[in-house]
Image (cartoon, rainbow, N blue to C red):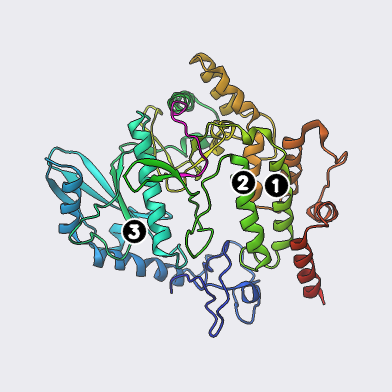
Amino acid sequence: MAPSVTCSIQGCEQPTIITRPFCTDCCKSHCWDHIEDSTTHPCFGRERVPFQPRDESELIAFHTEESLKIIQNLNSEAIKAEVEALRPNHKCAVVHTPTTVDQLQQLTGGYNSHVIIEFDDGQKWVMRIRRREWKKGHPEEALRMNVLSEVATMRALSRAGIPAPNAWAPPNDSQASALPTHQYLYEEFCPGNDAHLLALNFFFNEKEQIFVRSYAEWMIKLDSLSFDKVGSLTFSTEGEIVVGPLIEREPHSHTEPYFIGPFNTAKEMFVAKMDVWMKETVEKKRYLPSEELVSYLMLLEARALVEGCKEMEQGPWYLKHTDERGDHFWANEKGELVNIIDWEWASLVSKGEAFASPALFVRIASDDRLSEREIALIEAYEELGRPDLGDHVRSGRKFRLLAEVMRTADDVENLNALRQAFLGSTNDNAQPPETIEEWVRIATLRYSQDSGLATILSRARASLK
């Protein structure tokens, strides 16, 4: 069963929890009222036996269903016609269409499946297919906007001479869709290897040193590409690359315009996004019942800190890869960064955020000491004549912490560190709270006038009766 925007429980039309689109055990979707109710969702609260593999039969069937749908609907002749139209004067030699689920899943990641395409001159492209199973019934137009934004981002990078694959949307005048059931794009094939394991070595070695320096060189090139608005890149009706709405994993609405923005400043963007998230929380759409109080307080805290940040008012604005798991770095055998891929949720942010250390380079978020990789990155910028970019590595902690607490709200060390990073010596907590319960108590008093908080506190009290 594919995830839905409404609850899987029969007769329930309430929306699925945005941050928990489906259960990885039963592969069903649940609303706020049912997700933590063990009578309607038996998976909730189930104790797991340590080291005992869980039953993944439902999840495997879930993945297999979509893979089969993709295989059955791929149109090789339409693929050839489309890529030849996009690359005139070249013939498509072969489309490596998968014939089994295993073949497709070998080229499938968390959000995309891939098909390799070869031309008569040896050039390779990739057909990059958005997996619908994770998208919870997202509107088709929202998925299309996501694809167009990724194409626009890669094209802007490629045109600026910044190493990233060039990309193309399917031609509007195609006679037959290459895959009518899914949104997709075409991009250049990038040789190389996923570099995230390289940067996870316990000891910082020579190959990592090479990687960090080449990353610095890549970022210096990125410094040449800036924009006057905050949002995500897309195409105008005339086909020009422009700044459009902020494209994220989840649409900000399931009705038009789907995504918010563009904005004049990064501060406007963050405040607007947090306002949307707080509204969703009050409406029982965003967080689990057990998570919503601390998460809502986190949003109130983050919003207040961002509103006081002058740096987020200062443009121009730069591209940031917002899925920094590390597997977006593509390196050669020497350890040199040769490409950065997977740009589907890229956004425009302040220079301080764009040039802060990537997540793979840092210690745990609440640790304010520079890591060996960060020190090497600062030194590389200095050797390359750009010490100003090294300054952003030194001062970028608040952006890393902001992203971390918005992802996971219940770490008291991160919440304390966030306040310290934004407020510095003016921090009003002489003795930071040591537990999340103490932090919640303090934050509840600090933001007691917020009407949405009153609603959530009322729900929390009712659940204790």
Q: Which mark is residue 302?
A: 1
Query: Does residue 436 lie above or below 2 as drawn?
Result: above
Q: Is residue 226 magenta?
A: yes
Contact? badges 2 and 1 (CB < 8 Å) = yes
**Which label's residue is closer to the chain start, 3 or 2?**
3
In the image: residue 338, left or right of residue 347? left
Q: CA distance from mark 1 to mark 3?
A: 34 Å
**Which label's residue is closer to the chain start, 1 or 3?**
3
Query: Does residue 120 lie above or below 35 as drawn?
Result: above
Q: Residue at x 34, y 58 (%)?
A: 183
Q: How many residues crowd around disc 1 within 10 Å: few (fewer than 14), some, or many (20 or more)?
A: many
Q: Give residue 288's position: percent from left, percent from top.
A: 65, 66
Instruction: Report the residue marked by disc 2.
Output: 270
Q: Residue at x 71, y 50 (%)?
A: 411
Q: Range of the magenta residues?
A: 222-232
User: Depth check: 449 or 5 in front?
Assistant: 449
Indicate the secondary structure of the residue bearing disc 1: helix
Q: How many residues crowd around disc 3 within 10 Å: few (fewer than 14), some, or many (20 or more)?
A: many
Query: Does residue 140 lie above or below 11 as drawn?
Result: above
Q: CA distance from mark 3 to mark 2?
A: 28 Å
Q: Is residue 363 visible?
A: no
Indicate the secondary structure of the residue bearing disc 2: helix
Q: Amino acid at mark 3?
A: Gln
Residue most extreme to the front: 238
Instruction: Report the residue marked by disc 3.
Output: 183
Residue most extreme to the right: 430
Q: Is residue 230 visible?
A: yes
**Which label's residue is closer to the chain start, 2 or 1?**
2
Q: How many residues crowd around disc 2 within 10 Å: few (fewer than 14), some, or many (20 or more)?
A: some
Q: Give residue 158's position: percent from left, percent from top.
A: 34, 34
